[in-house]
Amino acid sequence: MQRKLFVKRFFKYFLLLIIPTLLAFFISFFITNSQVDKGMDAQAENTLSNVNTNLNLVLSGVMYQNNLLTNNTYMLISLKSLLRGQEKLSYRDMVYLRNIRAMMDSIVQSYPYIQSVYLYLEGYERFYSSSDKITYMENTEDKGWLDGYHRMDPETERYMNARAVDSGQEENVLTIYQRMLLHDGVIVMNINVDKYCELLERILSNDYETVLYMDRDGAILFEWNLQDEAVRQISLNDVLENDNDWIKIGKKRYLLHKAYNEQYGIYTVSLVSMQARMAGILPVLRLFFMMIIINTVAMLLLAYFTTRSRFKQLYYMIQVFDEAEKAVYPKEPRHDVKDEYDVILNNIIYLFLKNVAIDRDLKERRYAQEVAELKALQLQINPHFLFNTLQTVQFEIQGAAPNLKRASGALDNLSDILKYSLADSRETISLREEIKYLKKYVEIQKMRFGDKFIIYYDIEEKLKNFQVLRMMLQPLVENSISHGIRYISGRGYIKVKVFCRNGRVFFSVIDTGAGLSGEECRSLNCSVRNLENQHIGLANVNNRLVLQYDESAGLHIYSKKGMGTAVTFSLPYESVKIE
C-alpha cells in the first residue's frame, strides 16, 4: 500500500511539473530553431561571400595581365620576339620581358595556391611559363591546358575547367583561360585545388558545410569539405530551383545557397547539412533532458518524504489503537509533528481515545457493581440463548440487506463455533469435525486480517475419524495468528499437521510469524505447564490434555526469533482410535 501511494504521489507531482517544463521547452525549441535557421543562412551567405572574394582576387590577377599586355604594345612585341626565339634582344625587350617575369612571379608568390601562369600566342611553338619560362609545346609535360583552350567557344572570352596534371605526381588543378583582347592568344592560370582548399579551411567554418564550384553547364569543377559522395549527383537544375531552400540529396537534407560569377560563368554552391541544425538544437535538448532528470529526482524525493510522513502518522495511529485495545492510552498528543493537519488529527485521536478510556473506566466500574447481581443469574442463562440470538440477527441481516452476505456468513460461522464450544467439553468428537469448525474460525479471522496469512492442512486420511477433544486446535491457530503472523510485515503461513508415528498421533501447528527468543520460549513453556494458569489459551489446552490423557500429552513450544513458532503435542494412538 505504501508503495502504491508513493507511485501515485510521484506521478501526480511529476505531471504537475512536467506540463510547464514541456511548455518552456517547446517555446525554447521554437526560438532556438528559428535562430539556428537564421545562423545557417548567415553562415552560408558568409561562406559564399568569402569564396567569391577570394576567387575575384585570383581573377583580378588574370585581368591585370591581360590589360597590361593589351595596353602596352611594346611589352607584347617583346614577348613575341622572345617566343620566336630571336637570338638578340634589344635592351628595351629585355626590360619589358623582365617586367613580365616579375609580374608573373609576384602573382605565383602572392598566392601559394596558384601553381603556374602561362602566356600563349597563337602561331608560336613556344609559350611563356611562370615555372619553366620559355617552353616548347612538344617538351612540356602539361599539354592538357592547350586542348582546353582549343575547346573554348570562339565567342567566349573566359573559360574555366578542372583537370589533372602529372608532374611527377598527379595533381588536380582548376585552369582559368582569359583570351587576350587585341591579340590571338590566351592567359592561362592553373590553381592547385588541394592548396586552394587549404586556404578555404582557414577562412571558412567546415562544420557540416560543403562548397561546390560548378560551371555554367552544371559540371562540378571541384568541391571543398565533401562529406557525402551523393552530393556529386546534384544537378544545375537542383541548384537553380532550390536556392535558399532545403534539398534532399541521397539520404540527407541540405540547406542550399548559391552565388553566380557572371564573368567566368561559375556557380559557387553552399550546402549546409541538417546536422548543423541538430548541433544548434542539441544544447536545448540536453538542457531539457537535464531538467527532466532533475525534476524526476526532485519529485521522487518529494513523493518519498511526503509518503513516509503520511505513513509514519498512519503507523502511529495503528500503534495507538493497538495499545488502546490493551487499555494503554496516550497521556498527551504527539508534539513532534509539523504539519498542521497532522496536529489537528493527532488532537482528535487523543481526544477520542481519552473519551474511550473514560467510557471504559465507567463501564468497568459499572460492571464491578453489577457483577454480584449477574453472578447469581449467570447460572440461569441458557447457553443456547446466545446461539438463538445470533441466528435471529443473521435472519435480520439476510432479510434487510442481501448485500451483507459476507457478514451473514461470518455470523453463521460464529453461531456454529459457539454451539460447538458450548457442548459438553468432556465429550470427544472426530478429528474431521474438529477441523471443520477450525476452518470456520479461520474464515472469521480472514475477515479481519484478509490475506495476511495462508493456512495449510496436512492430515493423514486414516486419522480423520479418530476421536479428540473439542476446541483442541483452535487456540493453537489463534495463538499463531494473534502473536505470530500479526506482527510481521508481509504475508505469513500456518500449517496444521496431524500424522501417526511409533504408536502416537502427533499434532503440530507451525507458523512463519515473529517468533520468540530463547528466553521468551523457555518462559512460555513454563507458563503453559502451570496448572493454576487460566488466563492463557495455550495453558488451558495444555491443562485439558494433561488431565484427559497424561503428562506426555502436554504442549511443546519451539520458536526462533524472526522465523516462526511450532506448537506440538502427541496422543497415544490407542486413546484416539475408534473402538
Image (tube, rainbow, N blue to C red):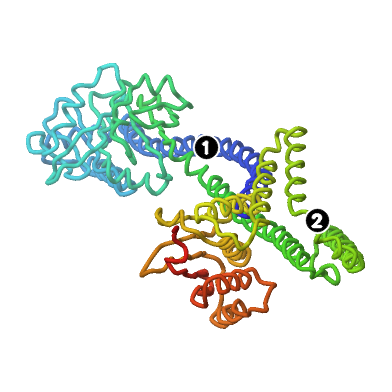
Mark 2 closeness class: few <14, some 14–19, many ≥20 residues within 10 Å: few
Mark 1 closeness class: few <14, some 14–19, many ≥20 residues within 10 Å: few
The CA span between labels 1 and 2 is 105 Å
Q: Position of residue 122 (x, y in %)?
A: 18, 25
272 left or right of 429 in image = left
- Residue 56 to residue 326: above or below: above
Q: Under tag 1, what secondary structure?
A: helix
| Chain-order first, disc 1 or disc 2 | 1
Q: Check disc 2 and give the amino acid type.
A: Ile
Residue at 41 percent of width and 31 percent of height: 253
Residue at 63 percent of width and 62 percent of height: 425
Which of the 4 image quarters holds residue 250?
top left
**396, 85: nearer the viewer:** 396
Residue 381 bears which disc, if any? Answer: 2
Q: Which residue lies furthest to the top in this view?
A: 155
From this viewpoint, is residue 295 visible?
Answer: no
Q: Mark 1 points at which residue?
A: 42
Residue at 45 percent of width and 24 percent of height: 243
Name the front one of labels 1 and 2: 2
Q: How many marks?
A: 2
